[in-house]
Structure formats: C-alpha cells, structure tokens
Image (cartoon, helix red, strand yellow):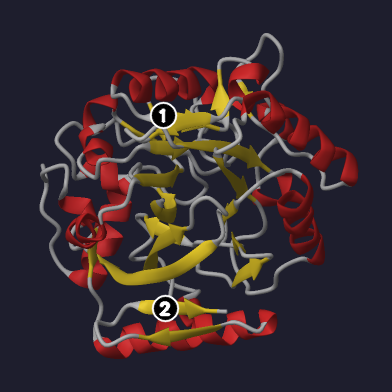
Amino acid sequence: MKLFLCGDVMPGRGIDQIMPRPCNPALFEPHLRSALHYVDLAERRSGAIPRMVPFDYIWGDALEEINLCEPDFRIINLETSITADGTPALKGINYRMHPDNIGCITAAQIDCCVLANNHIADWGLTGLLDTVEVLERSSIATAGAGRDADAAARPAVLELTTGKRLLVFAFACPSSGVPVHWAAEARRPGVNFLEYFSKDMVEHIARNIGKWKLPDDLVFVSIHWGSNWGYDIPREHRDFAHCLLDGAGIDIIHGHSCHHRLAIEVHAGKPILYGCGDFINDYEGIGGYDTFRPDLTLGYFLDIGDPDHVLRGMQMTPFQLTKFRLNRPSHADATSLSDILDRECRRFGHRVHLAADDVLVLSW
C-alpha cells in the first residue's frame, strides 16, 4: 500500500480570505482583528497574492508530485474548522474556512482528514459539527472527532478495490494545546482526547482497535502531540509509540503539532513520524522562528509491504510556502532541509539523503 501523508493543513484565516467565498474576516486575537492582516503580512514578504483563487491554488506544485507517486490513499491533519457560524473559542487563535471553499480539500483528492487537533473546535462545537458534516457531504472520511465519544474514537475505514483496508484512528493530546473540555463524551461532540500515556491507555487503544480490525487490515494511528517549536522528542512520546507498535497491532504512527519537521524512527519495521510539521498555513509574514525554516514543508510518501506491513521505503518531497502556495524549493533549500532531517534521524541510527531529483530518502 502506498500512502501520501502530510502534517497540518490550515486553509483558514488568511488563506480562506483569498478563496472564492471567504468567511467574515473578523478575528478575536490579542493583536490582530482581521484575517486580512495575515494576507497583508504575507504580501509584504513575498509580493502580491491573487484573490478568488482556484481551489487547487494552495497546493501548487504539490498536486503534480502527489499524482506522480500515485498513492492509494491521501491523509492530512486538517487544522481548521469548516464553518461560517459558531462562536469563537476563548483561546486567542481561531481558524475557520467557509464551507463553500471545501473545494480546496477535494482538489487534492484527500481521502481522510484527521480532526483530532487543537484548532478543529476553534469556533465551538457548532463549528466542529459543521466540519464533520461538510466533509461527510464531500465523501471525505474523518477520524479523531465526531458527534459523540463513540464517533470520535471510530476509525476512518479506507478500502481499496482489492478489499485491502486501512483503518485510521486519531488522538489529540493536551501537550499540543487541546483543551480538556473539547473531549468528546457520550452525548457531547468533541475530539478523541488522549489525556495521558500509560500501559493502561495502550491496552484501551488495543481493545478499541480489536473491535474494528480484520486480519489483513493495516492500522494507522495519528497523534496531535507536543509543542510548536524545538527538535526534542519527549521520552514519553517515544516509549508510548513503541508500546503502540509492539502491543496494539498498529503499523504506522503519524505525529503532528510542531510547526516544523521532527525526526523519523523505524521501530520493528514500522514507521514513527514524530512530527510532520505544517504543510499549508498563513504564517508566511510572521517572523521569530526563521532558524527552524518553517517555510519549508514536506510531503511524505510511504510504501508499506504486504502481507507483513513493514516499511519498504519512504521518500519526502520538499516544498516552500510562498504566497500561500506550495512551490518546489531551490536545490540549496532542499539540501538544507535534508541536512536538518538527517541530523535529527541520526539519533535513531537512520539517515536521510538527497536524491538526484531533490527528493529526500530515508534509510534505516
């Protein structure tokens, strides 16, 4: 099975404003009161950005690269509420995209949106429910949030014409800024909240997976965890990931929350992406963290073996966010990104090198 994965896709706020049907731009942030300010900040750095853009605009060069790789499934972490209504959560930063702009997700033929994150309920539970309904109407599977606790814990079931299935489970952790009151309950919508890492939690997750898994199913777990900046990987994250792979029947761990890329580990033949970084956002004009090169993003392409479900290969295609669009970067920037990821993966005895076509390749 071949998969395309990426980290946080955030088509709200400033990006929503350049699409055909933007939301009311009013914000409730401490320093900015209009989403149009984020467009202005990006234009000051990179030049004029078009308005009323076609829905595939934000994907830029990434669409061709994804299509060339012909993945069986395409999975993103959607960090934006899709709603024109709702009440802004009292958290300072609130992302939303107008439902009429859902074409920016369908344009990339996304199969599954992970919703277990710290922005999916930025416009209240009404906004969360609107998001689920819009994605359902668009035939896009979701994981990690829903109308109640059972729905939030339920996997997205993606099936190939051969009958081979991928089960996508998703969790949101408090360390990534997810409020505890966003946790889904028996009669209350919310996210699939992972409050702590423990042996008991691994067993709980394993039992839930067991309710859904058939013998040949590939099991994918997506986790929103950790802080926004820094390359450190908490020991509890690594230990928990190993326990999930060793004891819960999981084959792939897809981590996200950090705004830049983190190390990758292959444990017992199974990949752990500790942090995929942002893929699409409106941070272009915001400074202060340039040493992390948050403008450079990665699309991850995984080749998973059958029937053993071990990783056969992983390539990562680099892009640069410019004018709210993904563009192939210069060779120098691709080299820099490869060097950073190689440095971080060495802690696990793995290496990353830059291939001739400026694609990053993981070896382990």
For label 1, the crowd category at 10 Å Cα-Cα, with few meaning under 14, some 14 to 19 and many 20 or more, is: many
Say if residue 139 shows up in the picture. Answer: yes
Which residue is located at x 24 percent, y 36 percent?
A: 106
For label 2, the crowd category at 10 Å Cα-Cα, with few meaning under 14, some 14 to 19 and many 20 or more, is: some
- Report helix, strand or loop for mark 1: strand
Q: Which amino acid type is marked by label 1? A: Ala
Q: Where residue 174 sits in the image (x, y, percent)?
A: 72, 44
69 is higher (above) or lower (below) than 8:
below
For marks 2 and 1, the one nearer the N-term is: 1
The outermost residue toward the top is 187
* Residue 19, quarter of the rendered image: top left
Question: What residue did someone put label 1 on?
Answer: 141
Which of pointers 2 and 1 indicates the residue nearer the eye? Answer: 2
Tell me how many marks there are: 2
Q: Nearer the viewer, residue 72 or 8?
A: 72
51 is higher (above) or lower (below) than 142:
below
Judged left or right of residue 57, residue 342 is: right
Which residue is located at x 73 percent, y 33 percent?
A: 180
Q: Nearer the viewer, residue 210 or 357?
A: 210
Residue 361 image label = 2
Q: Where residue 56 sits in the image (x, y, percent)?
A: 16, 47
* Rendered-image quadrant of the C terminus: bottom right
Which residue is located at x 24 percent, y 45 percent?
A: 108
Q: Which amino acid type is marked by label 2? A: Val
